[in-house]
Image (cartoon, helix red, strand yellow):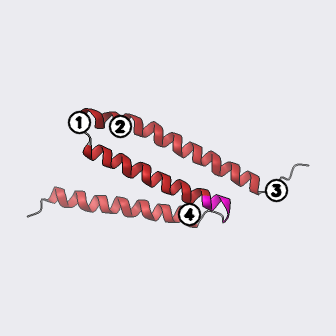
Amino acid sequence: MLDTGLIGAIVGSGVGVAGGAFGTWMSIRHSPPGPQRKLMVKASIACWIFVLSFVALVLFLPAPWKWWLWALYGPALLFFILSINRSFRNLSTAATPSTVE
């Protein structure tokens, strides 16, 4: 017989992955076509690999090491997000003609 905590973990994980997939799809769908969309696809793939690798390492590493991963995860994710935003902004400004004469 399944425990209610186990059912909650399975359902919660499923909802989280579905929400991440939906958010990824919407981010790609609402990106302008061309280089911005290509960047969004590459960034989405890299982010999914990064997050899934982190989850796998947290599940399979022994206790002292998995806690160090949490300390590295936040800054690494923040750096990734800021660098992708900077790249996207640079592509967006390069694609639009300048109005300054």
Q: Quadrant of the N terminus?
A: bottom left
10 Å crowding of disc 2: few (<14), some (14-19), many (20+): some
Q: Which residues are magenta?
A: 33-38
Secondary element at image label 2: helix
Q: Which mark is residue 63?
A: 1
Residue 67 in the image, given as x and y percentages of width and height:
30, 35
What's the residue at 31%, 49% (across, down)?
A: 56
10 Å crowding of disc 3: few (<14), some (14-19), many (20+): few
Q: Which residue is mark 4?
A: 28
Q: Which residue is mark 3?
A: 97
| Residue 59 to residue 45: above or below | above
Q: In the displayed orientation, state which residue is furthest to the right.
A: 101
- Residue 35 belongs to the span the image colors magenta: yes
Disc 4 + disc 1, Cβ < 8 Å: no
Disc 3 + disc 4, Cβ < 8 Å: no
What's the residue at 33%, 48% (across, down)?
A: 55
Residue 12 in the image, given as x and y percentages of width and height:
29, 59
